[in-house]
Structures are given as structure tokens and as C-alpha cells.
Image (cartoon, helix red, strand yellow):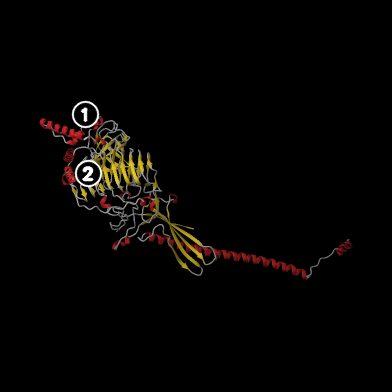
């Protein structure tokens, strides 16, 4: 057994490692170890490099953010200076430049939109500006990418104006309201300013100009009807005696055709002087007409709400308006509507804003309301704080303005006519509504233009009809105005009417049928010339007018014998019972002096010639510190 095992052992071959072989293996192990060490070392170096780069980027990012902050702060400070160049400016500045790179900022101004997520209303957005400041670190040469950071600061303009909110210690004279040009503040205190030579104003019975007038040249009163001069003189004399001005300068009551006073640049001709004396209207001559602001339709096609702010485009119009309501919008915040050429206005048209027409506006329709924007919402609340104290842009700006005799229209706001205003109310007629007379009192509150709500107390409203068929005569001193009734709420005793009115104190009112055709202007009118020519019903022949005066004289002779009161000529003409031998319309309405064209000023409303509404205040001396606009930051947002 033993011998056999030894034999097998002797037969098995033996492997022996030489020293050279062992050295090779060791070398491989060393190389592998060195390779792993190199990989680890490179990884470590790369990690350290990345860490250094990240630290470097963070440092550069912080510097870029600081630059953006500096840019935003500098822009906000500049925006409060009268020297601010506006939203079109792109302020930029290099803060540092060395061998490693350049640190700078750049600022731009952008509109603030409803998508910004800010707690501002849509009507506030046009008064907001987004200040966007970008800070940038730019390395020298091509050693790396630029690092940028951004700061966004949306701000809202805080306009300062008389009667508005004032900061502590701020003088009352500080105001950002843009001054009106060339004497317009003086001119707008007149119901009419007519600048043309020759006949500046021509009007006939059925017209009432309530308030001061300033005329460059002559005025023709009641000159169109075909009556003799003696009949005309009688009519003027009797009209002045029936509705004379009151004591202490109280103006002539409604429906006197003129209340005055009248300021004349030219000396009146003898006939005009006699006519004004017959009407008992006060006047002065030699009153040089102030410089009139220049008409520039282009300033309405593109406009700004505040100087140096964003520009907006007026909404273009076609040649005809009918059955449409136009109001301010986010894209057209002042509500300026622009027609290049002539414009025809049919029925059921409401414009809240400014209607601009480079040609002639012809109004033929009914239920037309053209209202200068009072900046109130549908509930009658101000769309912006203190906005009701701001001046209002014009209601109408045009080359010519003509009212057809069939029109029933209301204009609330200033009317700027480059050339002529013609036409007027139609013949006096009531609508076909139920004939009634309801006396009462009412308070009033504004709603979305052109409407107001009257809270009624007095006679029953049960028979009062809506849809402009009845109207409320609202007294104001010895005058007043008609407000067509849109709807009646019997449960709350409320009337929704057309026309802006606000009063917490009850005023006397009477409800009657509405006038079939009439034009009411509540605001100052500026034109070259005005021609309110006669209604066709006053166009009797000369012999018919002679007969009318003779018949009136006979009535008064008989009254004197019977001991009855004398009847004035206007009252005689207004009585349908005195027209039995004439046409049906005379037998129904007579010839009344009740105006179907009535122009008067808007109380407590200041008018602006054109946009912009605001410009940065420039103070001197102690008030220099209040110069520039004031802004309220809405947010401070930082990011890449």
C-alpha cells in the first residue's frame, strides 16, 4: 500500500514559481492599485472642482441678485423724480468690472396683467407698472457662462390731487393732475362758448341755454319763424316778462330761453341789444375771448392715462352705431371710441367714455346716451379710490355735431365741436303713454352709466310705465331736468332713470309722459357756431302770426272787461284751446316754450381737455421734496 502511494506521488508533476513570475504578479497588483488611486484622486479632484464651482456660482449668483436689488431700488427712486423718463426708458449700470468679469444691472418696465396674481382689480391694472431689474455677472472672456438674477417689483400709481388722500405733512397744493391747456378751466364754467365770427348763436323757441354764455360775435333770437318784427318783438318782450331773472342775480327760471349772463367780445348790434333787453338778460361787451385750446384728434387715437406711462389705443368705430353699448375695458381703460370720418347714431346707443369723430356726428335715433366716464361700476361704486374726484374727459369731440328733429338723446359731459353744432329738439310732443301727473319727492343714487335710481315717496307709481314712456322732472332751484324712466319697482318704490344723479336729501319731482323727441346736454359746449333753428311747428305764415297776435289781444281786452287776469303771449300760444282753427297737432299741444333742446352745466364736475389725466408734480422750495409721482409697491419677487 505504502509503496503504491509513493509511486503515484512520484509520478505527479510539480509546479514551481520562479522569482520572475512572482515579480510580474506583484507589478500587476501595484498597477491596479495605482489605477484605483488615480481614479479616486481624479474623482476627488473633480468633486472638489465642482464644489469650488458651485461655491463660485453661488457667490456670483448672490452678487447678481444684489445687483438686481440695486437696480430695482434705483428704478423705484427714479420713478419718484420729475425727471423720470417713463416706461420706454431702459436704465442700465455697470457696478463693478475687474479682471474676473463684470457685474451690472438692467431695468425694464412692463404692464401688470391679471395673471400676476396680485390683489388688484382689473380697473387698477392700468395704473400699475412692473419694474423688472436683472442683475448679471459676466465672466471675462470665455471662462464661463453669465450668471443672472431677477427682481420684480409691481407698483401702483398713487395720484395726488385736491380733496384726495394726503400723506402726513403734504401741502394741499401738491397735485399730479395735468393742468388743462389755454384757459379751458375758465371756458368750462360757461354753458356755451362760441368762437365764430358773424352769428355765433342762432336759436328759436323750444331752446334753453341755461348758464353763462361767452360769444365772440352776434346772437340771433327767434329769427327763423316767418313772423313780422312786431310779432317777434312782442314774443321776446312777453317771454322776458313771464320768466324774468330773480333778485340778487338769480337766473331766469325754466323754461326761459336764456338765463345769462352773456359775455360778448364784439359790441352787439342795436337789434341784438334790444332783444336782450326784452328778454331781461344781463350782458357785457368787450370781453375778449380767451385763447382756445387747439383741436388735435390724434391725441385721442392713442393716449396715456398718466404721462410717461403705457400707451393705449382708442377703439375704432364703423360709420354707424345702433343697438350697442360701449364701455371702458382693460385694453381701452379711458373708454375712448374713435371714428375717422362721419358717424351716424341710431337708436339704443350708450357710450360710457369719450366719442371722437373727425367728421360730422349725426344723431337720428332715440334712447341715445353719450356719457363722459364717471369711473363707477354697475352698482354705482367708484371703480378706483377717489376716482370720482378726478376731472372727466369729454363726452363728445367732433368736427360737427347735428341732431335730427326726431332724435331723443342725452349727453352728459363736455362737448367739444371744432366747427358747428346744429339742429335741436323736435316739435314738443308727448309719447303715447298713459297721460298722468304724479307729484312726489325722491332721493337718488348713481348706478352704472347712464342710470340712476330714485327712491320715491309721494303719489302712487301704479300707473307709471317703464321703457322711456314716462319721465321724472327733477327740480333744481327754479329749474330742473327730465329723466326718462327705464323701469319701475313697485315693491321698493324705486325708479331707474336715465341720467346721473346723486342726492341724499329729497328733492321735489313730478312724473309725466316723456317727450317724444328732445336733446339734453349736461355739460359745457365749445363750438365755432351754434344754430338751434326753429321747429317746423313754429313755421306759420306771416299772416297766421299776425292773426295769432290779434286774437291774443282780443282775449286780453275781453279779460279786462270781465275782470279776469291778463294772459301772456307765450301762455296764450301754449293753450291748445286757442288753436281750434289750426291743425290737429296744434289742437293737442299748442305752441309751448317747454324746451326740447336744453343745455346746462353739470354741477360739481370738472372737465379735462384730453388725456393724460396725470403728470408728475414739480415742486419748488419747500415743496421740491414732493416732486415726482408716488407709487405703492404691491410685491417684491426675487428669482432667476
Judge from the rendering whether residue 293 lies leftward or rightward of residue 571; answer left or right: right
State how far apart marks 2 and 1 are (Cα).
Answer: 31 Å
Q: Is residue 432 above or below residue 147?
A: above
Instruction: Quadrant for the N terminus, please.
Output: bottom right
Judge from the rendering whether residue 87 lies leftward or rightward of residue 594; answer left or right: right
Q: Residues within 10 Å of mark 1 (few under 14, many from 20)?
A: few
Q: Residues within 10 Å of mark 2 (few under 14, many from 20)?
A: some
CB-based contact (under 8 Å), mark 2 and mark 1: no
Q: Residue at x 36, y 59 (%)?
A: 80
| Farthest residue, direction top | 580
- Residue 125 visible? The answer is no
Q: Earlier in the sequence, mark 2 or mark 1?
A: 2
- Residue 586 visible? The answer is yes
Residue 349, x across and y down, in percent? 35, 40
Which residue is tagged 2? 220
Q: Nearer the viewer, residue 421 or 75?
A: 421
Which residue is tagged 1? 581
Residue 409, x across and y down, in percent? 31, 40
Amino acid at each position: 500500500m505504502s509503496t503504491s502511494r509513493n509511486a503515484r506521488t512520484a509520478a505527479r508533476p510539480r509546479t514551481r514559481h520562479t522569482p520572475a513570475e512572482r515579480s510580474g504578479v506583484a507589478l500587476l497588483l501595484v498597477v491596479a492599485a495605482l489605477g484605483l488611486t488615480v481614479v479616486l484622486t481624479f474623482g476627488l479632484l473633480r468633486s472638489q472642482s465642482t464644489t469650488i464651482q458651485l461655491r463660485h456660482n453661488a457667490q456670483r449668483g448672490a452678487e447678481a441678485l444684489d445687483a438686481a436689488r440695486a437696480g430695482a431700488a434705483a428704478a423705484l427712486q427714479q420713478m419718484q423724480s420729475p425727471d423720470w423718463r417713463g416706461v420706454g426708458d431702459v436704465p442700465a449700470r455697470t457696478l463693478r468690472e475687474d479682471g474676473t468679469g463684470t457685474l451690472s444691472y438692467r431695468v425694464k418696465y412692463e404692464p401688470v396683467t391679471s395673471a400676476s396674481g396680485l390683489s388688484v382689480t382689473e380697473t387698477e391694472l392700468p395704473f400699475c407698472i412692473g419694474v423688472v431689474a436683472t442683475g448679471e455677472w459676466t465672466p471675462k472672456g470665455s471662462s464661463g457662462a453669465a450668471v443672472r438674477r431677477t427682481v420684480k417689483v409691481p407698483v401702483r400709481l398713487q395720484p395726488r390731487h385736491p380733496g384726495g388722500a394726503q400723506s402726513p405733512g403734504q401741502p394741499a397744493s401738491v397735485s399730479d393732475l395735468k393742468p388743462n391747456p389755454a384757459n379751458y378751466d375758465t371756458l368750462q364754467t360757461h354753458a356755451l362758448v362760441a368762437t365764430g365770427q358773424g352769428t355765433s348763436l342762432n336759436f328759436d323757441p323750444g331752446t334753453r341755454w341755461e348758464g353763462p354764455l361767452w360769444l365772440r360775435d352776434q346772437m340771433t333770437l327767434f329769427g327763423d319763424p316767418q313772423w313780422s318784427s312786431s310779432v317777434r318783438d312782442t314774443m321776446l318782450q312777453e317771454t322776458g316778462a313771464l320768466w324774468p331773472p330773480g333778485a340778487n342775480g338769480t337766473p331766469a327760471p325754466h323754461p326761459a330761453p336764456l338765463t345769462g349772463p352773456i359775455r360778448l367780445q364784439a359790441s352787439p348790434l342795436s337789434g341784438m341789444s334790444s332783444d336782450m333787453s326784452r328778454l331781461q338778460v344781463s350782458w357785457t361787451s368787450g370781453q375778449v375771448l380767451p385763447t382756445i385750446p387747439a383741436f388735435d384728434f390724434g391725441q385721442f387715437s392713442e393716449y396715456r392715462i398718466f404721462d410717461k406711462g403705457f400707451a393705449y389705443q382708442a377703439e375704432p368705430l364703423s360709420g354707424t352705431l345702433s343697438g350697442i353699448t360701449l364701455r371702458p375695458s382693460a385694453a381701452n381703460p379711458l373708454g375712448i371710441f374713435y371714428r375717422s370720418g362721419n358717424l351716424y347714431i341710431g337708436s339704443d346707443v350708450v357710450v360710457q367714455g369719450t366719442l371722437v369723430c373727425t367728421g360730422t356726428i349725426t344723431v337720428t335715433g332715440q334712447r341715445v346716451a353719450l356719457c363722459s366716464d364717471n369711473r363707477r361700476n354697475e352698482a354705482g361704486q367708484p371703480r378706483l379710490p377717489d376716482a370720482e374726484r378726478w376731472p372727466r374727459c369729454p363726452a363728445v369731440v367732433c368736427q360737427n355735431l347735428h341732431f335730427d328733429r326726431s332724435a331723443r338723446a342725452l349727453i352728459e359731459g363736455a362737448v367739444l365741436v371744432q366747427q358747428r353744432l346744429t339742429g335741436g329738439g323736435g316739435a314738443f310732443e308727448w309719447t303715447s303713454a298713459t297721460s298722468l301727473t304724479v307729484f312726489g319727492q325722491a332721493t337718488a343714487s348713481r348706478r352704472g352709466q347712464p342710470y340712476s335710481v330714485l327712491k320715491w315717496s309721494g303719489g302712487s307709481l301704479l300707473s307709471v310705465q317703464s321703457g322711456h314712456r314716462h319721465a321724472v322732472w327733477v327740480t333744481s332751484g327754479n329749474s330742473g331736468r327730465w329723466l326718462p324712466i327705464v323701469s319701475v319697482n313697485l315693491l321698493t318704490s324705486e325708479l331707474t332713470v336715465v341720467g346721473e344723479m346723486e342726492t341724499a336729501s329729497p328733492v321735489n319731482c313730478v312724473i309725466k309722459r316723456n317727450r317724444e323727441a328732445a336733446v339734453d346736454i349736461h355739460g359745457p359746449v365749445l363750438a365755432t357756431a351754434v344754430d338751434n333753428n326753429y321747429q317746423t311747428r313754429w313755421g306759420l305764415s306771416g299772416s297766421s302770426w299776425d292773426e295769432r297776435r290779434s286774437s291774443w289781444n282780443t282775449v286780453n281786452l275781453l279779460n279786462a272787461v270781465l275782470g279776469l287776469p291778463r294772459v301772456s303771449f307765450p301762455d296764450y300760444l301754449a293753450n291748445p284751446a286757442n288753436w281750434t282753427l289750426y291743425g290737429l297737432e296744434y289742437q293737442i299741444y299748442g305752441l309751448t316754450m317747454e324746451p326740447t333742446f336744453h343745455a346746462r352745466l353739470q354741477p360739481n364736475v370738472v372737465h379735462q381737455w384730453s388725456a393724460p389725466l396725470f403728470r408728475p408734480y414739480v415742486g419748488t422750495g419747500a415743496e421740491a421734496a414732493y416732486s415726482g409721482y408716488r407709487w405703492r409697491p404691491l410685491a417684491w419677487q426675487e428669482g432667476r
